[in-house]
Image: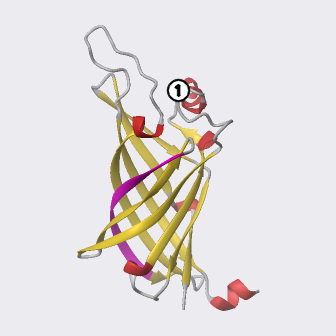
């Protein structure tokens, strides 16, 4: 029996960091997304298949000019490519509720594999009768692999923006009881 968990947007943060001038860290996240995890066998994370869709225009770093630049053709080209997506392909059990999840990340029409280190908490039953699972995931990617090439070389020879991007994901997944879903 397949169990479906959906991302709870109020308790999920799809975050990232990049280096600015190679000495400070800039943090950002996406505000508009949806996703689900389907377990083919209840209680067995190795049977999970995750899919996530993210609206690229929802990027937010706390600086409007930077956010607009990230939405532009120099980076995400949000008007041309309004969504990026991730689909898990393999899961490896590392023990102690930790997993290595590899999946296909599509950005700007380019799909490449990304591996995440994942920790899982739960499941628990919430006060409304739903099952909840917490997921913390981290990973690193090179943005140029997806055509996010814009940069400036500074006088000192360093880059304005790092090529390496760290992913920092905190997700709450919710599965509603079958009777609620059928209503």
Question: Percent position (x, y) of residue 181?
Answer: 69, 84
What span is in magenta?
A: 110-123
Question: Percent position (x, y) of residue 72?
Answer: 60, 28
Label 1 CA crowd tier, 10 Å (few <14, some 14–19, many 20+): few
Among the 4 quarters of the image, the one containing residue 160: top left
| Residue ranking furthest to the right | 183
- Please tell me whether residue 114 belongs to the stretch shown in magenta: yes
Q: Which residue is mark 1?
A: 66
Question: Percent position (x, y) of residue 165?
Answer: 37, 40
Among the 4 quarters of the image, the one containing residue 151: top left
Among the 4 quarters of the image, the one containing residue 88: bottom left
- Please tell me whether residue 48 belongs to the stretch shown in magenta: no
- Left or right: 90 in relation to 66: left
Answer above or below: position of 40 versus 90.
below
Please name the predominant secondary structure of the magenta segment in the image: strand
* Residue 7 or residue 141, whichever sits in front: 141
* Residue 128 or residue 72, whichever sits in front: 72
Answer above or below: position of 68 versus 170.
above
* Residue 117 or residue 13, whichever sits in front: 117
Q: Quadrant of the N terminus?
A: bottom right
Q: Quadrant of the C terminus?
A: bottom right
Answer above or below: position of 15 versus 95.
above
Question: Percent position (x, y) of residue 4?
Answer: 56, 79
């Amino acid at each position: 029996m397949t169990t479906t968990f959906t991302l709870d947007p109020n308790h999920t943060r799809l975050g990232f960091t990049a280096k600015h001038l190679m000495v400070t860290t800039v943090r950002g996240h996406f505000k508009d997304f949806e996703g689900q995890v389907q377990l083919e066998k209840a209680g067995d994370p190795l049977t999970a298949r995750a899919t996530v869709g993210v609206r690229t225009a929802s990027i937010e770093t706390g600086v409007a000019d930077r956010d607009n630049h990230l939405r532009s053709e120099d980076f995400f080209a949000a008007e041309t490519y309004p969504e990026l997506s991730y689909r898990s392909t393999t899961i490896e059990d590392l023990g102690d509720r930790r997993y290595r999840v590899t999946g296909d990340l599509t950005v700007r029409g380019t799909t490449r594999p990304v591996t995440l280190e994942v920790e899982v908490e739960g499941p628990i039953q919430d006060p409304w009768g739903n099952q909840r699972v917490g997921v913390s995931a981290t990973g690193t990617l090179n943005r140029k692999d997806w055509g996010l090439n814009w940069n400036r070389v500074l006088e000192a020879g360093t880059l304005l923006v790092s090529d390496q991007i760290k992913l920092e994901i905190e997700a709450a997944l919710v599965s509603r009881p079958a009777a609620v879903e059928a209503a």
